[in-house]
Amino acid sequence: MQSRADIFQYAEFDVNALFPKCGSFNWAVRLEFTDGVGWLLRSPQQGYGHLSEDTSGLLLASEAATLRYIKAHSTIPVPDVFAYSSSKDNEVGIPYMLLSIASGSPLEDTWKNPGADEPNMTHVDKAKIVTQLGVIAWQLSQLRFPQAGSIVEEDGSFSVRTCLSRGMVLHERDELEDVPRGPFNSEQEYFQSHLSAFLQHVKYLPLGFHCLFAPIPALTEYKDPAACRMAVDWWNDFVAVQSKIDSSYNRTDYVIVGEALLELVTKWTSMLSESLSNHDQKRFVLHHPDLSVNNIFVDKDFNITCIIDWSFCSSVPISMLLTAPGLPQSKDELDESLLSPFENGFRNALAECVHPHDGHLEDNLLDILSRSRPMWLFSRIISFDSTADLNLFSRIWESLGPHEQDLLEYLRSMQAADKYIALHAELEKDDPTELQMAAEEAEFLSKNVEKRAIARKLTLVADWASRYRKGDTQGIRRNGSVFVADKRLWQWIYQCLKSDDTNAQKKEDHVE
């Protein structure tokens, strides 16, 4: 057995003693050397709620390979990788990556999340950032591969292997069986595999806070933060009654959405195939899936100095790349006024690099750029990086129309279809019993009598169980449309209760 280096001879490596900075999937500490040089030591989080050791190791090795590939083949500012180990079989005893320190400051210091108290950046400065992201998208579009999947490095050469995208590994999807994991040879294979993972997830894995017809309230939907907090409380109670989120009803609803997306994306890829038909065989490009303000570093003049955290990066269909990223976080839709700066940044970089005889390439890329917005919506849904899945699906539905039915009519008709009634009956076998639901309600429902009453009355009006049954002559919604508990409902309740409080106060004042 190889002996450990002298530095480890008298002490064990204690991560907690270093007071690391922790993110969602990794922890990191800064290492300072006597000559003033600084490195970053980063390692995957371990334990409950985090990725498995095997998946974390694969992601670490792929990210290291991706960073080295980008550094060697572009001018995109990324950290240097000095060393890495994808397993704990090393002298340190943990998987790790040693990186250069990102220059500049994280964009999150100045580009604030909605509702933040601190002053935000000016629109001009935001446009400058987004324009640069358009240029980076152009550079990434030139890093091409014959297959879709994640990058690995062996003996100094790079190749594409198993796809480690968010939609394939997060939310316990890395443990799903019978999901094709690549590498993929066509756009159709790529999208079908991600939808396969999505469909298995919604059938068998926890759905977190995702309830298709009752999206969790978002702060951006409310002018008054107090109203949003109240809405979240009402939403929590509403979904707790009858365990709605992981119920067979919600699961079957999501299956309908997933299978509809499969049809829509087939139509989408056939439309794009015309733009790609004359292109070379290397049609897949690298894509950073989380260009959030946490992962973008800038100088004082808002020039981008570094892009970090390339976990889950893979080569993807080019339509996944040529769409403006979500900012400030990946799940947030970019302000419409900032879409043009992103497109202009890409167009300008394209115009500077394309030779006159490559005019067809310029036309093809610009055509995809102009039609790629549904891909941002699609990627948010299938990876569950969203808070309003029904709204995203509705916009995809509209953009890839026309359709014979509007969306809610379509969903209602699918809920009455024999195929989905049979699926619901199968999934219903795993629903909690009435006794189990009562225990869950007792644990999670608000202790406030008024809030409990609102949740139960809304459940009665929603007639949640009216879906997936034929010949219903009793249900409140037997002839009605789908009940949607969204911001309109919560804002209406808030205004009603606020009005009641105002009227009650006026009566008290009048009595006095």
Image: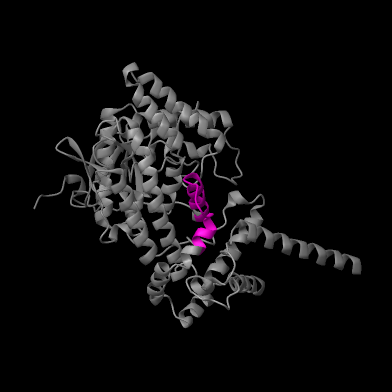
* View extreme (front): residue: 404
Nearest the viewer among 145 and 441 is 145
Principal secondary structure, stretch drawn in magenta: helix
x and y percentages locating residue 475 in the rendered image: 58, 75
x and y percentages locating residue 255 in the rendered image: 41, 62
Locate residue 274: give its quadrant: top left
Q: Residue 405 magenta-drawn?
A: yes
Q: Residue 52 magenta-drawn?
A: no
Nearest the viewer among 195 and 433 is 195
Whether residue 435 is visible here, answered yes or no, is: yes
Magenta stretch, residue numbers: 390-412
Q: Residue at x 58, y 64 (%)?
A: 481
Locate residue 276: give its quadrant: top left
Whether residue 383 is visible here, answered yes or no, is: no
* View extreme (left): residue: 1
Locate residue 66: give its quadrant: top left
| Image quadrant containing the C terminus | bottom right
Query: Is 97 located above or below residue 461 in the figure?
Result: above
Nearest the viewer among 285 and 111 is 285
Q: Residue at x 29, y 57 (%)?
A: 174
